[in-house]
Image (cartoon, helix red, strand yellow):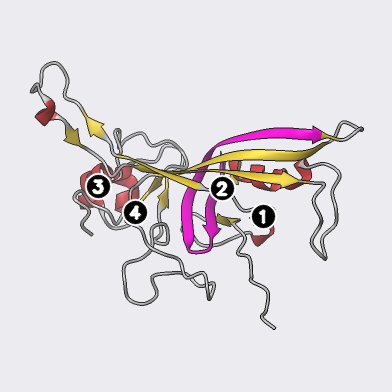
Amino acid sequence: MSSPVRLEKAELQELDAELRETKRENWTKLQFNPESLKVSFANQIQTPGPGDQSGTQARQFVGAGTTKLALTVFFDASAPVPQGESPVDDVRKLTQKVAYFITPQPQGKQLLPPLVRFVWGSFQFDGIMDALDENLEFFSPEGKPLRASMTLSLSQQRISKFNFRDSGGGGLPGTGGGPAMPGTRPLAEASAGATVQGLAAGAGLGGNWQAIASANGIENPRRLPPGQLLDLNLIAGGQE
């Protein structure tokens, strides 16, 4: 008799500033896997001002771009509960575990949203949750919502080629000598008042700060929004 097929569940995991797994008590497996994932890429293109050259050839690629992940997930408090779990009478007791990842948390003297890793089988995406919409449906006679859909948007400040997570053994990809998977190489997180020059100097890369700013798509290297992620190993042209 064949054994039942194991269903891989999508999960949200919290990461620290070095993209290491942390605070497992905040991790959450989604109740139902999403039906689809939408990955969007955008390059940063600069158009010269009135005093510069005219024409389409004058447009320049000035950054590594941005990658975004969008997905919709569903929750149902009236669905059968897996063995070992307690039933809930309000679906928000399930969705609050997802909402945690968009809620700013104390980090030193700042409040910043936690870094999050979305994992589903061979797919992995590391970034920050920048948008979350929740629709509450199917209310009980007591006025408690029992079903909900959540649309999530995650982003990272770069574009990387596809790599594949080893979902069979549960280990991280890139351990066979090949290139590291996007999101597994440590990124630097900007704190309030941080600059590209300061972050690069702190990593011993002070002489490359201009190339790092260009490769990460930084328009103003002297003013970084708190929580922005930078790959200090990138330089313009994709070289390392």
Q: How many angstroms separate mark 1 from mark 2 (CA)?
A: 10 Å
Residue 49 image-quadrant placement: top left
Q: Earlier in the sequence, mark 4 or mark 2?
A: 2
Q: Residue furthest front?
A: 1
Which residue corresponds to mark 2? 114
Q: From the image, which quarter does the C terminus lie in?
A: bottom left
| Disc nearest the viewer among 4 and 3 | 3
Q: Secondary structure at mark 3?
A: helix
Q: Which mark is residue 209?
A: 3
In this figure, what is the number of numbered marks? Answer: 4
Residues under numbered marks 1 and 2 in contact, where contact means CB atoms less than 8 Å apart: yes
Give the percent coordinates (x, y) of residue 67. Answer: 39, 44
| Disc nearest the viewer among 4 and 1 | 1
| Disc nearest the viewer among 4 and 2 | 2
Q: Which mark is residue 26?
A: 1
Q: Which residues are magenta?
A: 110-138
Q: Which mark is residue 202?
A: 4
Q: Residues within 10 Å of mark 3 (few under 14, many from 20)?
A: many
Q: Earlier in the sequence, mark 4 or mark 3?
A: 4
Q: Nearer the viewer, residue 51 or 189?
A: 51
Kind of residue indicated by mark 4:
Gly
